[in-house]
Image (tube, grey):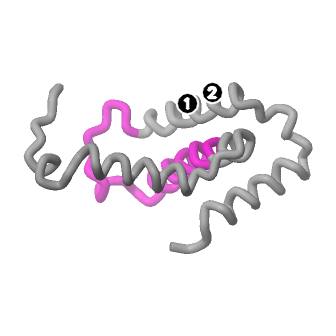
Amino acid sequence: MKGSLYELQKMLDEFIAQREWQKYHTPKNLSMSVAIEAAELMEHFQWCDKRADQFSSEEKEEIAEEMADVLHYLLRLATVLEIDLYEASRRKIAKNQKRFPIDKAKNMKKSGC
């Protein structure tokens, strides 16, 4: 994988600082922006039952931009709250490994539709 979360976070920090947008980047505003951008991402899949290999290059590029927006707001929120998102993610994976051991996870019955 190219680059790192840390490098990307620093690029965003510089971009924001150059435009003096820090004053708008409150936890509330950033968390709301994550949800808004996630909703924009979901619009690409609403009423759509395509498999991953059925999306055109143009569709994938639009989806990638929405995914990037979600990631950027998450990284900014992590900066503002001084959360190491890499470490938080690593801890969450470890927690889920305990919560969903392989032998049980493979035989889980899914609820819902």
Identify which residue is drawn at 55% across, 30% down: 35
Residue 57 percent across, percent down from the top left: 44, 60
Q: Tag 2: residue type?
A: Met
Q: Tag 1: residue type?
A: Ala
Identify which residue is drawn at 37% across, 38% down: 45
Give the left or right position of residue 87, taking residue 95 as reference: right
Question: Callout 2: few (<14), some (14-19), or many (20+) C-alpha neighbours within 10 Å?
Answer: few
SS of the residue at dot 2?
helix
Q: CA distance from mark 2 to mark 1?
A: 5 Å
Q: Which residues are magenta?
A: 45-74
Give the left or right position of residue 58, taking residue 101 as reference: right
In the image, 43 versus 76, the foreground residue is 76
Residue 37 percent across, percent down from the top left: 57, 36
Above or below, 39 against 20 in this view is: above
Residue 30 percent across, percent down from the top left: 68, 33
Above or below, 31 against 15 in this view is: above
| Residue 19 counted in the magenta span | no
Q: Circle 2 sits on which residue?
A: 32
Identify which residue is drawn at 67% across, 40% down: 77
Q: Are marks 2 and 1 in contact (CB under 8 Å)?
A: yes
Q: Which mark is residue 35?
A: 1
Residue 21 percent across, percent down from the top left: 86, 40
Q: Which mark is residue 91?
A: none
Provide the major secondary structure of the magenta segment: helix
Identify which residue is drawn at 54% across, 55% down: 87
In the image, 49 versus 102, the foreground residue is 102
- Quadrant of residue 86 within the rendered picture: bottom right
| Residue 62 counted in the magenta span | yes
SS of the residue at dot 1?
helix
